[in-house]
Image (spheres, coloured by chain):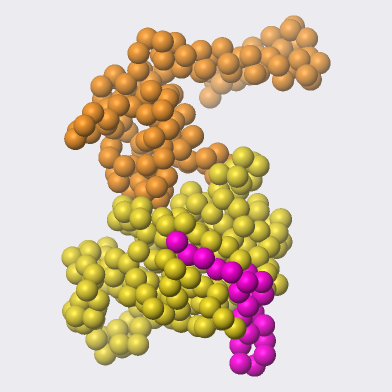
Chain colours: A orange, B yellow
Amino acid sequence: MLDFSELSLNTSEPVYAQINEFIKRQIFLGKVKKGEPLPSRREMATLLKINPNTAQRAFRALEDAGLVLTPKNTVSILYFDEELLLDIQREMTADIVAEFVKKLKENKLSLDEVMGLLQQEWEKGAKE
Amino acid sequence: MVEIKDLYFTYPNYQTVLENITFSVPTGQIVAVLGANGAGKTTLLKLIAGLLVPDGDVKVRIDGKTPQKISGKIAFISEAGTYFNDLTPKTYGAFLQDFFPTFDKAYFDMLLDFFQLQERPMKKMSKGQKAKVEIAAGMAKRTPYIIMDEPFVGKDMFTRQDFMQALSGTLTGEETIFITTHEIREIENFVDRVIILKENHIAIDITLDVLRQEGKTIQELMKEVIGYEENSFYSLLDKTEDSI
């Protein structure tokens, strides 16, 4: 079962978008498998202290994104095909890097400077 | 569906509290009515609940009718507490069950348990405990319209969060809810829409979707519109703490 206890909602993005993002991340990290059941809408509302319409909307967004299937009269399950998985992987890696590089270029930083900073920051993270 | 059009309200002492209030709320929407103390929040809620009558012609319509005509479909929950001080929570529940056909006794008992309320006359309870009985009673009426005036007053953070969780898990999504509170944080991810009152008028009326597209939180919006700091009002009030 998909575990929502690690999702801490912020107050700046739409709740349904945060849920969507969280699930994509769980898939990317390999923490959930295809076919895994999702909590019910009511359970999701209770766990996240959101209103039931927001939970409903999150489900609809997930279904629209092709990440959740709700077969008739059964619980919703997580679903993703190869193509979707590749999309998610790209989103979680290449897109982040592209955005990062764009911002750095806007700040007029050179590749050498960035590499240096990156290494510093990376090693800092490793020590913590 | 709640429709309010050109609403004005003046108290008998000629003090005008609300002017030119117009908005409508579709079924199932959860609306936070915010504003500084004295901005008219409670008055607006009482007008929607039909506990006050606006100036002039009919200005509030709920499902096309006046609130007074469908009072059985509206639950008004406030910190004011109960008028039935001699009853215990359970006997109060039995009384309400006789009175309201939709009263959900099992849900009421669950909420009493949840709030850890003991069986004793309500006159012997603290203000916070009485408010909890009123919340339980109001919710258990299972009405399609729920109006909550400061439901968090006198409750600590854990009780507030527990209450939000109980609320999230027990609503069906069909209820239309109005809520006033100073505890903005508790409702940031719960409400669909925010209406801020300032100097008798609606200063802003915005959905959470649009607000977040603009990259703002409700707290930031409050600061911007009325220069509000969360919880600063506590310094002005005698804090009523729960005795639990």
Q: Nearer the viewer, residue A122 or B145?
A: B145
Q: Is residue A37 above or below residue B193?
A: above
Q: Nearer the viewer, residue A87 or B176?
A: B176
Q: Residue at x 32, y 75 (%)?
A: B72
Instruction: Please give left or right for residue A62 compared with residue A18 in the image.
Output: left
Q: Picture quarter containing residue A86?
A: top left
Instruction: Please give left or right for residue A25 compared with residue A69 in the image.
Output: right
Q: Nearer the viewer, residue B20 or B115?
A: B20
Q: Residue at x 27, y 30 (%)?
A: A70
Q: Is residue B208 above or below residue B88?
A: above
- Residue A36 screen position, x and y as percent: 26, 25
Instruction: Please give left or right for residue A30 compared with residue B185 in the image.
Output: left
Q: Which residues are magenta?
A: B1-21
- Residue A88 screen position, x and y as percent: 46, 17
- Residue B162 screen position, x and y as percent: 36, 57
Does the rendering let one see residue A1? Answer: no
Taking the view exactly as shown, the residue that stands out farthest to the top is A112
Q: Is residue A75 above or below residue A115?
A: below
Q: Picture quarter containing residue B197?
A: bottom right
Q: Nearer the viewer, residue B14 or B137?
A: B14
Instruction: Please give left or right for residue B17 compared with residue B113 in the image.
Output: right
